[in-house]
Image (spheres, rainbow, N blue to C red):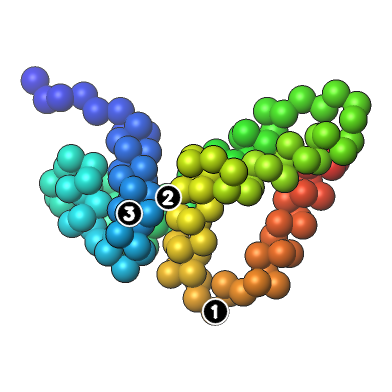
Amino acid sequence: MPKLVDHKKRKIQIAEAAWKVIVNEGIEQATVRKIAKTAGLSVGSLRHYFSSQSELLRFSMELVAKRVKERAEARKYDGDPMEFMTEAICEVLPIDEERRIEMEDRMAMHHLLYPKQFTYEKMIRTLKYHLRSLCK
């Protein structure tokens, strides 16, 4: 009987392996082979979930964004707008290991996937957009 695999969990496992490679060795070393090895999979198994390196990196970047958004949205507004905004801003700052990894990975992947769009001004606009959405 074939082994049952939770495809969603496996994709997340692969994305997290990509994060480890990027943080420890740099985006240039984030090859499919190295990510597969870090995830404990064969290249063929990884290709079953992601047909290309850019598809894998895009998924990894989207997963980081989803996790940050979920943490920010989980914050309860208790009536103090300054405290709420401070906590929301802290969700995107590298104040602990998890957030540092997320920020480094997202910036590295964004730069690799969208080199012409990766500018300081674009990052500021994106941050402002997300902060405004939290204020609604």
The N terminus lies in quadrant? top left
Query: For the residue marked with disc 1, what is the amino acid?
Result: Lys
Residue at 84 percent across and 42 percent down: it is 135
Q: Is residue 59 left or right of residue 49?
A: right
Task: Read off the residue under disc 1.
Answer: 116
Task: Read off the residue under disc 2.
Answer: 60
In this view, the residue farthest toward the bottom is 116
In whole angstroms, how far apart are the C-alphas of marks 2 and 3?
16 Å
Picture mark count: 3
Mark 1 falls on what kind of element? loop
Label 1, residues with CA under 10 Å away: few <14, some 14-19, many ≥20: few
Q: Is residue 101 left or right of residue 25?
A: right
Query: For the residue marked with disc 3, what is the amino acid?
Result: Asn
In the displayed structure, would residue 40 be above or below residue 122? above
Who comes first in sequence, dot 2 or dot 1?
2
Task: Read off the residue under disc 3.
Answer: 24
Who comes first in sequence, dot 1 or dot 3?
3
Residue 49 visible in this rendered orientation of the protein: yes
Mark 3 falls on what kind of element? helix
Q: Quadrant of residue 118?
A: bottom right
In the displayed structure, would residue 7 be above or below residue 111? above
Q: Are marks 1 and 3 in contact (CB under 8 Å)?
A: no
Q: Is residue 46 left or right of residue 91?
A: left
Q: Quadrant of residue 56?
A: bottom left
Query: For the residue marked with disc 2, what is the amino acid?
Result: Ser
Closer to us: 21 or 59: 21
In whole angstroms, how far apart are the C-alphas of marks 2 and 1?
20 Å
Residue at 21 percent across and 24 percent down: it is 4
Q: Quadrant of residue 7?
A: top left
Q: Are marks 2 and 3 in contact (CB under 8 Å)?
A: no
Who comes first in sequence, dot 2 or dot 3?
3
How far from the left and from the top, in percent, is residue 64? Answer: 51, 46
